[in-house]
Image (cartoon, rainbow, N blue to C red):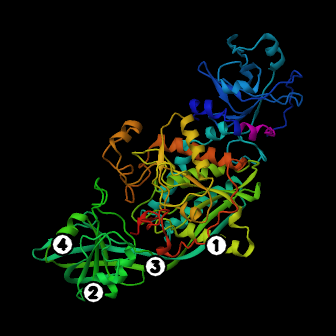
């Protein structure tokens, strides 16, 4: 329905891909019509075909889907094995007449030199357009094929039961991968949220119905190997907004979600007491037992962010007899990014029951330098429950060289999560549908993760299980060649980010296993071919790729931004609003179907499909993966998560943990 000519021009000539598809098969006809095509018995080298559109000529791959989802193919006799087929100018195959030829492989390097002649004859108007691109008469005669009759075949796009063992090309899959289809999946997720209290969080009915929708789509596409992997976790719920009221020296009621917020996995209760600052103005406030030596039991502990995990600060405060905890931001960034509120988590490791909130830097300093009595109340519930990861894989492909493509399916409890992460979930679903009948070289495994929003719980469980199996069999984790992660790829105020696989920006907080840089280079070539600017995204513990990096599996992925503020420079490159969040509705009720940028989602959905197909056909450009498993991988132990520079990891999923 939409063709990105610039992308197709450059991508059609990637030499690695050309070698992969050189043996591609023809689609079997969905009807029994005779193939009466005449052909010359010629011997000429093959390269990609041509697509004529509005007098513009550019390379395109073997098959093309038209806007009505039918597949057009011109057939030839087996004696001509190298024919490349142009697309119809008309919806009616009988109105088009084509003559075209091919030339040497070297012509790939120069898009408009030494190519062939194409004549297009419209039977009604008796007029034709001729393109001669430098072939001699002898070359043209040797390489020209006249197709006298064409045959229309059912679409190779999508799950066509009559198109088994079909080979797609990069050009085709990005044409089949329509924005409209991805948006349709997002709309379905929105409707599910609407019917389930406006959210799709793990542990709730909205998530279960989201899983059911994905399963139904996969089954309709022909997938039979579908697994729902169950795991237990602690579900955290905020039953009511926390309250924070200053009683002395004056009465002040602070505003929830503006001045302070409930920390994830906080206990529930009320504390009314003096507020006591703990090791104020220190980068390690509340990180050591000694910080609480003179702490008056029963007071509310006021602790500055930094130096250790939030759960460590709260546990030490509880051990010292605190009745509640306020952690405030540390103001340590010149750009003000560590002044305001953020989503802080104590993690499932916290089993105490202190009410704990997070506050702004400005208020924390004010309270620390005054004698203050506060009343702090949180109303929360922690419940043991279960959820499921959803996994589906292709029948075809090498089981010992698995390409994994994943996105988290859950939303936060505060909203429907249609960008975060309905965008990634919808994109990989549509990619799975398009890949359903492709005769892949490597097995494809698609994953929709649960409970990412509360700490990468689903993906961590999956990798832990594989590592456990690897300890017994030595194979399961080693069979994963790479993992591609897509989390928030349609942000309204977007910036195109590619996971920084080689850490060239120097901002990664997690090791990037060998091969990650190669995946980054693939995405860079995609965006360059699409004439789209891009920048690196730091690889850390902020999404479901992290358990895979910790296990030594090469990773790559895309991201369009969350709460980070778009700079003036970024606005000049990608448009949008400088000084505003890349996703103004991040983790809010307004993250709905309208919280989207069509262009960002369109380009990224194509990139998802292209990378999926590319690595499904070959992982030869990646290093051997079998020697990269980390014996120290312990994601369940929060205090074991360390950065590549030896420091703490500050985030786990979308929540800050320190």
| The magenta segment | 17-29
To which residue does mark 1 refer?
465
To which residue does mark 2 refer?
293
Q: Residue at x 72, y 48 (%)?
A: 620
Q: Earlier in the sequence, mark 1 or mark 3?
A: 3
Q: Earlier in the sequence, mark 1 or mark 4?
A: 4
Evaluate if marks 1 and 4 touch, with contact meaning CB atoms under 8 Å apart: no
Q: Position of residue 391 (x, y in %)?
A: 64, 63
Query: Can you say whether 436 is above or below 631 in the image?
Result: above
* 445 vs 75, nearest the viewer: 445
Q: Residue at x 22, y 87 (%)?
A: 296
Snapshot quadrant of residue 288:
bottom left
Where the C terminus falls, by quadrant?
bottom left
Q: Residues within 10 Å of mark 2 (few under 14, many from 20)?
A: few
Q: Which mark is residue 349?
A: 3
Q: Residues within 10 Å of mark 3 (few under 14, many from 20)?
A: some
Q: CA distance from mark 3 to mark 2?
A: 24 Å
Q: Earlier in the sequence, mark 2 or mark 1?
A: 2
Q: Main secondary structure of the magenta part?
A: loop
Q: Position of residue 164 (x, y in %)?
A: 78, 47
* 645 vs 625, nearest the viewer: 645
Q: Nearer the viewer, mark 3 or mark 2?
A: 2
Q: Is residue 173 left or right of residue 40?
A: left
Q: CA distance from mark 1 to mark 4?
A: 46 Å
To which residue does mark 4 refer?
367
């Amino acid at each position: 329905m939409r063709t990105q000519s610039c992308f197709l021009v450059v991508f059609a000539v990637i030499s690695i891909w050309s070698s992969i598809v050189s043996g591609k098969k023809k689609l079997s006809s969905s009807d029994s019509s005779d193939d009466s095509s005449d052909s010359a018995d010629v011997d000429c080298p093959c390269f990609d075909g041509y697509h004529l559109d509005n007098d513009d000529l550019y390379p395109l791959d073997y098959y093309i889907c038209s806007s009505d989802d039918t597949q057009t193919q011109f057939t030839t006799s087996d004696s001509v094995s190298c024919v490349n087929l142009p697309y119809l100018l008309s919806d009616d195959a009988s109105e088009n007449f084509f003559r075209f030829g091919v030339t040497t492989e070297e012509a790939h390097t120069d898009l408009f030199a030494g190519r062939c002649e194409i004549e297009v004859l419209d039977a009604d108007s008796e007029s034709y357009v001729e393109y001669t691109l430098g072939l001699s008469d002898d070359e043209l005669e040797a390489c020209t094929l006249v197709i006298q009759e064409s045959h229309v075949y059912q679409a190779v796009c999508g799950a066509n039961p009559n198109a088994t063992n079909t080979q797609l090309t990069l050009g085709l899959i990005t044409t089949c991968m329509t924005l409209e289809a991805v948006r349709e999946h997002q709309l379905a997720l929105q409707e599910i949220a609407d019917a389930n209290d406006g959210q799709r969080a793990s542990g709730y009915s909205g998530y279960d119905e989201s899983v059911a929708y994905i399963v139904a789509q996969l089954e309709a596409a022909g997938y039979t190997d579908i697994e729902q992997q169950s795991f237990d976790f602690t579900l955290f719920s905020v039953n009511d907004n926390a309250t924070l009221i200053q009683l002395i020296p004056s009465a002040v009621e602070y505003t929830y979600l503006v001045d302070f917020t409930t920390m994830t996995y906080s206990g529930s209760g009320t504390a009314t007491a003096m507020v006591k600052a703990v090791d104020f103005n220190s980068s390690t406030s509340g990180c050591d037992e000694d910080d609480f030596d003179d702490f008056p039991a029963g007071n509310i502990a006021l602790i500055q962010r930094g130096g250790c995990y939030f759960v460590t600060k709260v546990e030490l405060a509880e051990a010292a007899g605190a009745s509640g905890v306020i952690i405030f931001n540390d103001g340590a960034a010149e750009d003000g990014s560590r002044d305001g509120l953020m989503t802080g988590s104590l993690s499932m490791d916290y089993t105490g029951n202190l009410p704990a909130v997070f506050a702004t830097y400005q208020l924390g300093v004010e309270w620390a330098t005054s004698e203050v009595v506060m009343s702090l109340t949180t109303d929360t519930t922690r419940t043991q429950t279960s959820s499921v990861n959803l996994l589906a894989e292709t029948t075809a492909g090498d089981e010992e060289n698995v390409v994994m493509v994943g996105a988290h399916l859950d939303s936060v409890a505060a909203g429907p999560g249609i960008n975060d992460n309905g965008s990634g979930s919808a994109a990989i679903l549509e990619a799975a549908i398009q890949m359903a009948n492709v005769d892949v070289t490597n097995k494809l495994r698609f994953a929709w993760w649960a409970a990412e929003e509360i700490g990468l719980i689903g993906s961590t469980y999956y990798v832990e299980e594989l590592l456990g199996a690897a300890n017994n069999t030595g194979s399961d984790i080693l069979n994963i060649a790479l993992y591609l992660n897509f989390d928030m790829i349609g942000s309204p105020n977007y910036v195109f980010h590619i996971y920084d696989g080689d850490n060239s920006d120097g901002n990664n907080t997690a090791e990037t296993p060998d091969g990650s840089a190669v995946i980054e280079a693939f995405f860079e070539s995609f965006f360059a071919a699409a004439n789209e600017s891009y920048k690196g995204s730091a690889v850390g513990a902020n999404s479901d790729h992290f358990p895979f990096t910790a296990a030594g599996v090469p990773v790559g992925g895309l991201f369009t931004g969350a709460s980070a503020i778009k700079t003036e420079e970024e606005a000049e490159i990608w448009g949008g609003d400088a000084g505003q969040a890349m996703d103004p509705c991040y983790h809010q009720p307004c993250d709905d179907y309208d919280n989207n940028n069509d262009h960002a989602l369109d380009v990224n959905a194509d990139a998802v499909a292209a990378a999926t197909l590319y690595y499904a056909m070959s992982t030869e450009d990646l290093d051997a993966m079998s020697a990269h498993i980390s014996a120290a991988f312990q994601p369940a132990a929060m205090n074991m998560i360390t950065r590549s520079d030896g420091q703490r990891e500050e985030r786990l999923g979308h929540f800050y943990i320190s």
